[in-house]
Image: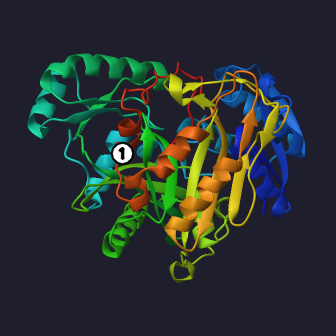
Amino acid sequence: MFEKVLIANRGEIAVRVIRACRELGIRTVAVHSTADDDSAAVRLADEAVRIGPPASRLSYLNAAAIVEAARQTGAEAVHPGYGFLAEDADFAEICADNDLVFIGPDPEVVRALGDKSRALALMRAAGLPVPPGSAETVAGLGQARAAADEIGYPVILKCAAGGGGRGMAVVGAPAELAGAYARTRAAAQAVFGDDRIYVERYLDPARHVEVQLLADGYGAAVHLGTRDCSVQRRHQKLVEEGPAPALSAGTLAAIADAALRGARAVGYTGAGTFEFLVDEAERFHFIEANCRIQVEHPVTELITGVDIVHEQLHLAAGVPLRPRQQDVLPRGVAIECRVNAEDPDRGFLPTAGRLDVFAPPAGPFTRVDTHGFAGYVIPPYYDSLLAKVVTWAPERELAIDRMDRALHEFAVAGPGVRTTIPFLRRILDDAAFRKGRYSTGLVDRLTGDGSAAPAEPAAGTGAYPPS
């Protein structure tokens, strides 16, 4: 096992990884910008290295500064968390070139699955169902129009290099295509530095279901069950639960088997997630793979008892996969609500400021992952995720009621600070959600005025957490 790991991230995921390392006897290095000098991660890590000013491109996206911090502190490995450089194949290669273990899949796997169009082609070749769409990226509006006409409206335009729900546009009719194409291409270039676009049939209504995987470098792989991530605003997740509700056991098993088949086809290693859309007839289609830890990983941890970050560290150190498929016995239901520093009444506009009051909930089967504390100043430079509240119960109804109780207890206050807590409680009270028969359109239905669709962040700001 490693003796020292550098965490190339910030916020709650940096705290999560630091805690996992401490439990395994691994020393930690937190890198941070000047805006995070007094952060929880800096306080909890064994060492901390300031790597730049607040702007992400000069700090958390500065590969050279991160590698230099690892070399100076004697770290053997780098855990990228999620977002920032977590799915950057070039960064993974830079780590390898500097004798640092990148805690994630091999760079070529990251590169292949990070290109959404290429990932679809690879999964199609592996026998996974994929949505009807353009076989490759489209070269110009003419090709996009031809693809949309062949597929049939509505369609969705996606960035080939996209991720985290960003860079997508739903087009309901031919007259809307030109404007949507121009906007999506511009957003793709600004946010990802890659303006390639592909076209898919837009499935509506649909459920967003994902499968958590673990795989080692010796050919072994297991799935840890499913999660439903359909409660989204602008393709950004707000509520996740596991296992996916209101789907037959046969469908859930088939989705999990497809995910394993796809992972084996590309030689996937480490922890990862394969994501699918499921229609009303329970037909499912692969849409993307995430080569990193997910924001919602605690859902799976609570229903399986598997510590996914522990497993990431063991797998990266070359330890053969420890859980066997027959050892994975999901139990009960877990639900996660993302408490974001956002104002739902103003289009989910991010808010910043000092937290005069910050009192997370507690109680039976209630977990809170956060980097917040009373006196913490939420910086305006990064994603708005403040805390994740996760509850578990033997039955779904109790898990929901327990979550509502937990959110009711959660006290957050400070000048100008608003959170999504009231809106999350509206979701929990919704009849369709309570029945487990909801789709990706739930948040739009509850807002009813388009307020669930804020503007895209500027390039490199990290204004939203990844999916």
Relative depth, front residue between 355 and 260: 355
Q: Is residue 313 visible?
A: no
User: What colour-coding does the image apply?
Assistant: rainbow
Type of the residue with mark 1? Thr
In this rendering, is residue 82 above or below 122?
A: above
Residue 255 figure quarter: bottom left
Left or right for 436, reference 182: right
> In the depicted view, which residue is nearer to us: 417 or 177?
417
Residue 1 located left or right of residue 389: right
Quarter of the figure that contains the N terminus: bottom right
Q: Is residue 138 above or below residue 14?
A: above
Tell me residue 160's x, y (percent): 36, 34
Q: Secondary structure at mark 1?
A: loop
Residue at 24 percent of width and 48 percent of height: 131
Q: How many numbered marks does the figure carry?
A: 1
- Asked where in the image residue 74 lies, by quadrant, the reply is top right
Classify mark 1: residues with Cα within 10 Å, few (<14), some (14-19) or many (20+): many
The residue positioned 36% from the left and 45% from the top of the image is 440
Residue occupying the point 47% across, 66% down? 243
Question: Is any atom of residue 392 visible in this view?
Answer: yes
Residue most extreme to the bottom = 326
Position in image of residue 92 (x %, y %): 60, 42
Question: For mark 1, what is the residue?
Answer: 440
The percent coordinates of residue 316 (x first, y second) are 66, 59
The answer to whether 85 appears left or right of 247 in the picture is: right
